[in-house]
Amino acid sequence: MGKTYERIDGRLRTFIEAQPLFFTATAPLSGDGTVNLSPKGLTGSFAVLDAHTVAFLDFAGSNAETIAHLRENGRITLMWCAFQGPPNIVRVHGRGEPVFRDDARFAELLGHFPDIDAGSHGLRAIIVVTAELVRDTCGYAVPFMAYEQDRDLHARRFAREDDASLDAYFTKKEHIATSLDGLPGLPLPLPPSTV
């Protein structure tokens, strides 16, 4: 049933890049800390950088748990599942790092996402994940569901923000600068964009 892969390429890469939705899972080191599981979408916000590295855009939202957990320990799992076509689930277990807007690598990384207007979504960081274990398993119990289109609500909400108003929005939110478990989250004030 399940198979382990050394690289993200060929059929595996094609499958991952074709999915309109994936999930991220992170957790703090504390045994009683809050495990975080987040759905990620928006066409063009995910990229395979090479056979061992993927990245996704981290947009404005009401918390920053993924960023906080990655800053503390780097552990992350990404998961895609087929809602159409042959049943399949792919997981990438690895180490992640948030690359913030004032990082010298930010502009180059952003170049891997040419099909999305990142500015209209309140881009906070680019999450870069280095794969340590890549596996697929059957998705026999995953239901068939049809993808219709991306929602436009996120872009409509955050397109009207500039850096100053985004910083004010993030500062007002309880779990942006600090996670649910008190870990450092998004650095505030919001780092200026290098692009």
Image: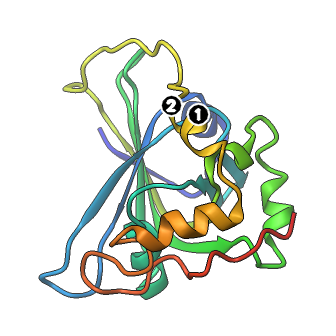
User: Could you say which is closer to the camera, residue 40 or residue 188?
Assistant: 188
Residue 125 visible somewhere in the drawing: no
Looking at the picture, which amino acid does disc 1 mark?
A: Arg
The mark total stands at 2
The residue tagged 1 is 156
Residue 21 visible somewhere in the drawing: yes
At horizontal 42% and vertical 78% (from top left) the residue drawn is 68
In the image: residue 140, left or right of residue 66: left
The residue tagged 2 is 153
* Image quadrant assignment for residue 104: bottom right
Furthest residue in direction left, as rendered: 32
| Label 1 – label 2 distance at C-alpha | 5 Å
Where residue 13 sits in the image (x, y, percent)?
A: 62, 39
Looking at the picture, which amino acid does disc 2 mark?
A: Leu
Asked if labels 2 and 1 touch by Cβ distance under 8 angstroms, the answer is: yes
Look at the image and tell me in which quarter the N terminus lies: top left
Helix, strand or loop at mark 1: helix
Helix, strand or loop at mark 2: helix
Where residue 2 sits in the image (x, y, percent)?
A: 33, 44
**Mark 1 neighbour density, 10 Å: few (under 14) some (14–19) many (20 or more):** few
Look at the image and tell me in which quarter the C terminus lies: bottom right
